[in-house]
Amino acid sequence: MGCVLIALGLFLLPYIDTNFAETESRDIKRLFTYICIVGFSLTTFFALFLFTKITQPMQQLIQAANAIRKGNYGMRLSLRTNDEIGELANTFNHMAIQLEDTIRNLNHEKEHLASVLRSMTDAVITFDGEGKVILTNPPGEKIMQAWYALDWAQEDGSLEGYTAGKPSRDVPEPLVPLFRLVMEQGGDQSSNVHVQQGVWSVQMAPLYADSVVRGAVAVLRDVTEEVKMEKMRRDFVANVSHEIRTPLSMMQGYSEALLDGMATSPEESEELIQVIHDESLRMGRLVKDLLDLARMDAGHTDMNMREVELGELLERIYRKFMVRSKEQGIQLQFDCKQEISLQQADEDRLEQVFTNLLDNAFRHTPEGKSVVISVERITHMRTSFARVCVKDQGVGIPSSDVPFIFERFYKADKARVRGESVGTGLGLAIVKNIVDAHQGTIQVNSVLGEGTEFILQFPLDSSK
């Protein structure tokens, strides 16, 4: 506006009479000055109007947009106008409210999913289309670390470099075949995966995006105990059938021989009857051992708990086996240097334990070797224990069989058993149950060809 007035004054200046201009120069200059001041004022006012109505609201809108871009979803505009700027501000606030609600709902869903995954005892592992691990829950992370460490050790020969440079987070080797099937066929797949001594049940399903498989999710469950128990059940049925079938077959065969009159003399008849009697006793011992184990497993073992002097008990058992040691040419030694009493113990059950261990030692120890029984008091972490060792110089147990000797129907190789008498394979299982019932522990050390040592520990009263 000021520029227009100045230009108008300059345009009319030539048409003014020179005389009038000379006489009125001061008035014209004054008028010109006024026009300039008014024009400048109008221009400034218009600029302030533009800044207040357009530029400043746009700057606020830009600042609010940047705040939301940085994650401040609670940002709002406080513009209250009826023009297009006000409508834009209202639209922006509505968009911010919707976006904040959406982000909040997504975070709630994410936290809910994370809580579900954390609470699951099964391992959950998610892979992308290239086989990279993108999500795990704590059990899944634990499994992944163990399997990666195992792969690293197999490749490097040790675990020393694992912490310094961990292998890439790809599909673990045991899951690769199942992952390929899911990616190629697009359906759910399941399998049992064996890793060292463990067995894992794996359920793997594809992840879709626009009808295209973009990855897979695997759920792993440790079924080692279930598989082991199922194997033990099958072995138990097979072993019981085998153990009972043998004496039954012999009893049936010898009884048929008696019925058919194959015994030509009283001596032969007596021999056949003796075999039948021995096999019936053997089958009775088997059934009794099975019933004892069943009662122990069910927690119905009858224990007559009282104070037992361990040295006296072992000395009595030692004297009982002295006759057998002389007959078999085995040196039996007993070492007890102090009195040790168990406050709560079943003397008959403990005698069954030590009798069983000594019987095994004698059956596996050749003539001229020795069997040693020792008992002593030991203290560990301010707790006293009675330590009993039964050590022989027999054939020993293979290291591969040692972890299984307390399982039912475990038997050493019959070619290494001294004599023809073979047990039922339930003795050590009963021993383990009785020791556990006394809150004790039992372990075995054995070297093939050198001998076996059973070490039993029972807790003692600290005041004794």
Image (tube, grey):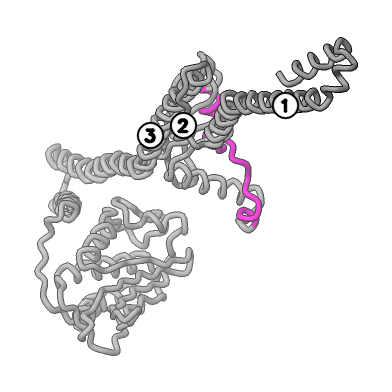
Horizontal side, residue 377 vs residue 449: left or right: left
The residue singled out by tag 2 in the image is: 76
The residue singled out by tag 1 in the image is: 34
Q: Quadrant of residue 343?
A: bottom left
The kind of residue on which mark 3 rests is His
Q: Earlier in the sequence, mark 2 or mark 1?
A: 1
Residue at screen point 31% across, 71% down: 456
Q: Earlier in the sequence, mark 1 or mark 3?
A: 1
The kind of residue on which mark 1 rests is Tyr
The kind of residue on which mark 2 rests is Arg
Residue at screen point 30% across, 73% down: 457
Q: Can residue 127 be seen in this view?
A: yes
Residue at screen point 24% across, 44% down: 240
Q: How dense is the environment of label 3, judged by Cα within 10 Å: few (below 14), some, or many (20 and up)? A: few
- In what element is the residue under mark 2? loop
Q: How dense is the environment of label 2, judged by Cα within 10 Å: few (below 14), some, or many (20 and up)? A: many
Residue at screen point 16% across, 38% down: 256
The residue singled out by tag 3 in the image is: 108
Q: Which of marks 3 and 2 is nearer the N terminus?
A: 2
- In what element is the residue under mark 1? helix
Whole-number angstrom distance, CA of label 3 to CA of label 2: 23 Å
Horizontal side, residue 103 vs residue 313: left or right: right
Q: Is the residue 260 above or below the residue 307 in the image?
A: above
**Is-magenta flag for residue 440?**
no
Whole-number angstrom distance, CA of label 2 to CA of label 1: 46 Å
**Is-magenta flag for residue 169?**
yes
Whole-number angstrom distance, CA of label 1 to CA of label 3: 68 Å
Q: Nearer the viewer, mark 2 or mark 1?
A: 1
The front one of 134 and 241 is 134
The front one of 107 and 212 is 107
Residue bounds of the magenta highlight: 161-182
